[in-house]
Image: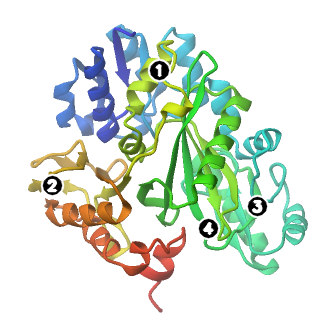
Amino acid sequence: MFQRILVANRGEIALRVIRACKELGVEVVAVYSQADRDAPYLELADRAICIGKAASADSYLNIPRLIAAAEVADVQAIHPGYGFLSENPQFAEICRSCNFEFIGPPHEAIRKMGLKTEAKLIAAEAKVASVPGSDGAVTSEAEALRLAKAIGFPVLIKAAAGGGGKGMRVVRDEATLPASVQSARNEAEAAFKNPAIYLEKYIDRPRHVEVQILADLHGNVVHCWDRDCSLQRRHQKLVEEAAAQLPIDVRRKLGEAAVRLAKAVGYTNAGTCEFLVDAENNFYFIEVNARIQVEHPVTEEITGIDLVQQQIRIAAGEPLPFGQDDVRSEGHAIEVRINSEDPDHDFRPSAGRITDLRVPGGPGVRWDSHVRAGYSVPPNYDSLVGKLIVHAPSRPQALARMRRALDELVIEGIKTTIPLHRRIFRHKDFLEGNVDTTWVERVLMPPKAK
């Protein structure tokens, strides 16, 4: 086991890694920007090092400064968390070339799965179905038109090198295709420094289901079952559930497909295989997230596995202490993301000082957050201020527990998404499981007529 680990991240995930390290008896070094100098979790680290100004490019995305901090602190490994550099193959490669273990997959696997066009080819070799589409990047508008006609409208344009909805366009007819291709390329270039795009068939009202995997350095790969992440707004997840509401045979097939993918690419550590599921429960691979996910707690709740501790143990060379038959899915867990945004004004960011914070408790309730009363949410980063998670024996019980917990949760001084979640958890469609990736925009918050 490592003696000392550096956490190359901030906020909620930095605190999550600090806690995992403490329970493993590993010293932990936190880094922070000038905007985060008063972050409460810094007090829990064994050491905290300032790595630059508030801008991400000067701090959390600055590889030389992170490596310098790791050298000064004499760590053996670096945990990237999620976001920032967590899926950057160059960072993973530099960490290892500087003799710091990167707590994540090999840089080759990150590079292969980071390019969705290559990931689809690997999926095909592993006999995992992907959404019908182009075999590689689309290089011209003429090629895009030819492919779109062959696939059939509507089609989806996607950035080859990224996610989060950046560079994504739904095209429903031939007339709007050229402009959509160009705007998608421009957005992809701005977001990922890579303008490559590809096309795939647009599946109407799909569900977004992902499978958690763990793979050690000894050839052992297991899946930790599934999560339904269909409740989204502009491709950003709002609510995640485990297990997905699918027949058990479909869930097993999803897990088996994810394991085949991981083995095909030589994957190690924790990762997530994401799929779209249609109305007939056919599933199609879309991408791999080569990191720990924001929504990992719901998997921890139904399996009893500490995924972050397993990440660290795997990176240290330990074999998985369980096999596939030992990983059970028990009960139902739900997570809601509490963001510092104003849902009534197009989710406008709401930075500022938290004047009051009252956190719910009771059986089966978990609050993962780096904030406290008096903390000032900086305007420089992601708007996530906390994750509220519940676990119960059944989905109806979990829904009731979440409604109760949301009613108890109080955050004052800033606008948050708490009121939106209270609406969601009282909506008939959601309670009955009749939602998809477009439900929020179509039903809950349709565009206002101009």
Earlier along the polypeptide chain: callout 2 or callout 1?
1
> Mark 2 highlights which residue?
360
Q: Earlier in the sequence, mark 2 or mark 3?
A: 3
Neighbourhood count class around disc 1 (C-alpha, 10 Å): few under 14, some 14–19, many 20 upward: few
Q: Earlier in the sequence, mark 3 or mark 4?
A: 3
Reading the image, the residue beneath label 1 is 321
Q: Earlier in the sequence, mark 3 or mark 1?
A: 3
- Measure the alpha-carbon separation of dots 3 and 4: 14 Å
Of the residues under marks 2 and 4, which one precedes in the sequence? 4
Tag nearer the camera, 3 or 4: 4
Residue in view at x 36 percent, y 47 percent: 381
Residue 274 got which mark?
none
Q: Amino acid at mark 3?
A: Glu
Describe the colour scheme in one phrase.
Answer: rainbow
Quadrant assignment, res 431: bottom left
Say few, some or many: other residues with alpha carbon within 10 Å of mark 4 (under 14 / 14 to 19 / 20 or more).
many
Q: Position of residue 222 (x, y in %)?
A: 57, 32
Say which amino acid is labelled 2: Pro
Front: mark 2 or 3: 2
- For the residues labelled 2 and 3, the Cα–Cα distance comes to 43 Å
> Residue 352's spot in the image, x, y percent?
19, 55
Query: Which residue, given by chain and number where applicable, does mark 4 sit on?
Result: 206
- In the foreground, 155 or 25: 25
- Circle nearer the N terminus (1, 4): 4
Q: How many marks?
A: 4
Q: Is residue 89 left or right of residue 265?
A: left
Q: What kind of residue is marked 1?
A: Pro
